[in-house]
Image (cartoon, grey):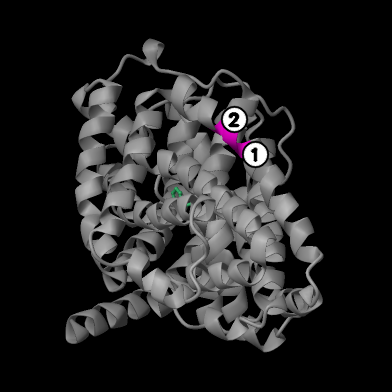
Amino acid sequence: MAAQGTRERFSSHAGFVLAAVGSAVGLGNMWRFSYLAAEHGGAAFVLLYLVMTAGIALPILLAELVIGRGAARSPIAALQHFGGKAWRPLGGLFVASGFLILSYYSVIAGWTLRYLLEGLGSAPEPDAAAHFQRITSGPAPVLWHLLFMGITVLVVAGGVRKGIERTSLLLMPVLFVLVVGLAVYAATLPGAELGYRAFLRPELDQLLSLGVLAQAAGQAFFSLSLGMGAMLTYASYLGGDENLPVEAALIAGTDFGVAFVAGLVVFPLVFALGLSEQVSGSTVGALFITLPSAFATLGGAGRIVGTLFFVTLAVGALTSAISLLEVVVASAIDRFGWSRRRAAALIGVVIALLGVPSAASLDVLGLVDQIAGNVFLIAGGLGLAVFVGWVIPDPTPELRRGARHVPWLRLWRWLLRFAVPVALTVILLGVTLPDTLAALRDFFAGG
Ligand code: PHE
């Protein structure tokens, strides 16, 4: 294990918060959130999502920050530090999630890079669906995925301050400006109000479905990078005097804000141009087909807006991908004593290879997303809630370092001990696992 004294640290609170926000804000906000909201009743989904974020995700985010900062170790070692050897497998699940999620996340990010660079060059393709088909088959998606992994490895190899923190400080403000600018532009489109209506009109009957609840919970975990030790790992590079509840609220609030504003971009674009039918077509491809169609209809302005949209997406994807890689890299550094560069390079190669099947097949990609991006994260969150709620002696002193007044402390503990484990168990056993088994069956029956 690396000596504690030499462990790297973020250079400032802002650096940490922006890195954590960078991890949270990504493809999940701009692609998964809009898709799910469109599918599950607009504002009704947004409302459920807010409830899940406040009631389940935020307590777990705070739990990850407390364990990470308290242990100042990577996930497996941190869990062992507080809970003994029996808890190492939970850390192992986190590392497995890091490998698997990044393997397909990078494929989608690779498409984004390709759309982005194409937008700068040739005229838009008239048939967006055929174009998406081309982009996601053959050797091209593999090459773009490798390129994106290469960039991710370079950032992580640069270290916590010079790689992760610097990249986030530079890129996150750019992302905020871009996403707000895009929303302002979308507001000027004739017919934008149709999009707002679809996004903001609640279809309340959806509120009562356990399936939608499970989707909202899964999205809250994915979007806040929870249940796989990413936030825990970033918090392990903190100094000790941060007000963790405030920072957790800031991270969750910003993540929601970006998802919401991204909805204000996507919905008007899609609905003003009468493309809403296409969105329900496929989970993974929807945005990559619909939005380019929208941009193509908008002529010269669409070219610029389209390029800026994909820049925003790529920036979000990069700052999220580095946190996924960092979980695995930090674990390898602590466990095997490797240098950071070596760990980043070796693990980057393994993840790049792991992503090849997802690059070659949308079905594989969807399946890995379902297993790692949904089941593993919810299971990991359940484990964390039990760990902090029941196993570690008392998280309060760690919480009070840097936060003299901790509001809602008892509520937080109650949520972690009772409400969160019960809700996550119901969701996991009632929806997520059965759905995943059905998806696996379909996959093997169809393939
Ligand atoms: N939160 C990221 C997003 O919304 C994805 C992610 C999940 C990143 C898990 C790290 C860990 O795109």
Q: Residue furthest front?
A: 122
Residue 86 sits above or below residue 56 on the image:
above
Q: How many marks?
A: 2
- Kindly identify the residue that appears in the image at 50 percent across and 32 percent down: 235
Q: Quadrant of residue 100?
A: bottom left
Q: Give the residue type that dot 2 points to.
A: Leu
Q: Amino acid at mark 1?
A: Val
- From the viewer's side, name the closer residue of 121 and 106: 121
Q: Secondary structure at mark 2?
A: helix
Q: In screen coordinates, is 236 left or right of 183? A: left
Q: CA distance from mark 2 to mark 1?
A: 7 Å
User: Is residue 234 within the magenta segment?
Assistant: no
Residue placed most toward the observer, 153 or 122: 122
Which range is magenta?
168-172
Element marked by disc 1: helix
**Residue 274, position as x, y percentages in the image:** 66, 83
| Residue 170's disc number | 2
- Could you classify mark 2 by the number of other residues whose Cα lies within 10 Å: few (under 14), some (14-19), or many (20 or more)? few
Viewer-nearest residue: 224 or 400: 224
* Visible residue check, residue 263: yes
Q: Which mark is residue 333?
A: none
